[in-house]
Amino acid sequence: MSNRDLLIEIGLEEMPARFVTDAMNQLSDKVTNWLLEHNISFEQVERFSSPRRLAVLVHDVAEKQKDVELEAKGPAKKVALDQDGNWSKAAMGFTRGQGATVEDIFFKEINGIEYAHINKFIKGKDTKEILNELEEVITHLSFPKNMRWGNQELRYVRPIKWIVSLFGDEIIPISITHVTASNKTWGHRFLGHEVEIASPRDYEKLLMSQYVIADYLERKEAITNQIKILEEDNNWEIPIDEDLLEEVTNLVEYPTAFYGKFEEEFLNVPEEALITSMREHQRYFPVKDKNGALLPFFVAVRNGDHKHLETVAKGNEKVLRARLSDADFFYKEDQKLKIDDLIQKLDKIIYHEEIGSIGDKVRRIQQITRHLSGLLGLDSETKEKAIRAAGICKFDLVTNMVYEFPELQGVMGERYARLSGEDEAIAVAINEHYMPRHADDVSPSSTIGALISIADKLDTIVGCFSIGIIPTGSQDPYALRRMASGVVQILLDKDWNFSLEELFDYVLGLFVEANIAKLEKQEIKKELVQFFKLRIKHELNNRNIRYDIIDAVLGTNVGNVGLIIRKAEMLEKNKDHHDFKTTIESLGRVLNIAKKGEDAEINPSLFESDEEKHLFEKFTEVKPKVIESLKTHDVVEAFRFLASLRELIDQYFEHTMVMAEDEEVRKNRLAQMVQLSKLIYLIGDMNSIIVK
């Protein structure tokens, strides 16, 4: 029996561009999984999309499901048979549910227990008989936002206008929101018309004749190639922002790139504002010369052919001119303002009703920056600049330009600070304190920028935690996870010797003193430590550190983030060394017994064996060396000193009964284990490491 091709297309009103690619992939994956789950074989799956359609074409779909033979497992033998050897109700119920009788039961041993089984044969159905179930696949696509229309109950990304469902040349009976499937699709909204699809494999070619490039990647490549031609013809450089390219690809069905121009006088406006206006508001690509200087041109992509492109370009130029005129006006007006006047306006803007104004936030950032500057031991001049930068880091939020273009916060702050005569380091820090802005961004390059960035992010995170705003699941409306990852990234890049727990204590103190914190300080701190541990865990996973070693280094306080990473990498590197197993086992044995003791001073006069004495002497010798090595981040040397205790630890346990009958001796021996465990925990929780 020959196979047939399967085509499913959902025709919609224009979808938001950012939803299209994911929806296309969802439809393809769900149809693929449905075929696999129903034992229907096929060859290849192609996926298509445009602003008005989602489609999937499956090649060589089998006409019939595969027949299935399987063993159905039932109750254990002792349950299936009663004391007299008769079939129980459980056995009869099991067979009835499988469409069999108790005579079909046989027993099979699994993990030493016999279970009742039935050989079950399921004959495959004809594929076309069950393809209408794909209706549920279509209606269960998920989108970030849905809508309802008319009196329909279905919530979907946009109203469904038509459905194509073909199995070979046969229409699959599907109906959704009173739209019944057919073999007819629509071409481009203005250049195409309704067409009939004779065969699923004609789909892509037929749509092309109707000015629709259905293949997302082909459409994307067409845009890229057209932009490159404009580059070559005009000796330009047209930087292609991938996010913008993705969006434009999903805004058009038949792309045609063209260029327009704007008045050179607008080049006096900061380049960032011009590019933002073009890219974010108009979906235009900026144009530069070979030296990287912005030119008074732009490139746009039309959803249509080449006809009347000059008219289209003029219309786009008119729209952009209005945008750039606004930007020019805002820029000139902002330069009349004074930074100190703008700072006062921040007190009138509520940051969060329970936390206070942006002015309050800036003052806390300034306090945190002052504290961090002291921890780093900055010279007085740098510290003074850092405090000044922290105090004005948000002033541009009340400028006209940032109000119109929020994406330019920090960027305009740097520009205006420079124009106002602020020190260059201060101006740069105002922009850098927002970095890293996203997962692929770099951290601040300057010391001052990095300090204020940490201060700002910690203030936001700790403030939110203080009033009970803690990310759960996928919910993170304040992007606290991204901020925490930014703090971790900066601390790693700068290799600063800050203890996270100490930073939490200081910042938390500010919120407690201001009576903002709703929860107990220690409870908030515990949540913060756990939250940051998850961010560090993510970083360690990216560095291919084994999960048990991650658990080991994160099993205690976080402390210095860079040191955590070094310890994990050292343990990962040494995990296969021949001495590693015995060392970890010995150190782990100490940790286990230490849990029974209390943190107390060791009294050498209570030692009863040479092993106790020798271990104590070695511990006394090694402890300062381990601590000093960790201070200089020499984790290899620290672990080497710790490992030098192994032989004496083994001898100690071989000849010493820790839980002695004499209470004083027992407590002293446990105290010795506790003190030793505290030193071991400086490297990590060795009991978390799996050794073979």
Image (cartoon, helix red, strand yellow):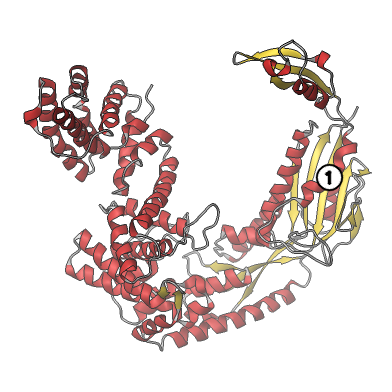
Look at the numbered disc 1 and give the secondary structure of its residue: strand
Residue 5, x across and y down, in percent: 85, 39
Q: What quarter of the picture does the C terminus occupy?
A: top left
- The quadrant in which the N terminus is found is top right
Amino acid on which the number 1 mark rests in the picture: Leu
Q: Give the left or right position of residue 256, taking residue 617 as reference.
A: right
Residue nearer the viewer, 83 or 360: 83
610 vs 189, left or right, is left
The outermost residue toward the left is 605
Q: Inspect this view and state whether residue 228 appears.
A: no
For disc 1, the marked residue is 7
Pinpoint residue 350: horizontal percent, then vertical percent.
45, 77
* As drawn, 585 above or below 398: above
Question: Residue lying furthest top in this view?
Answer: 84
Foreground pick, 55 / 279? 55
Locate residue 374: give its quadrant.
bottom left
Q: Is residue 77 above or below residue 563?
A: above
Give how far across and how far down residue 396 sits, in percent: 42, 78
The residue under the point 80% across, 32% down is 40
Q: Position of residue 407 (x, y in %)?
A: 50, 70
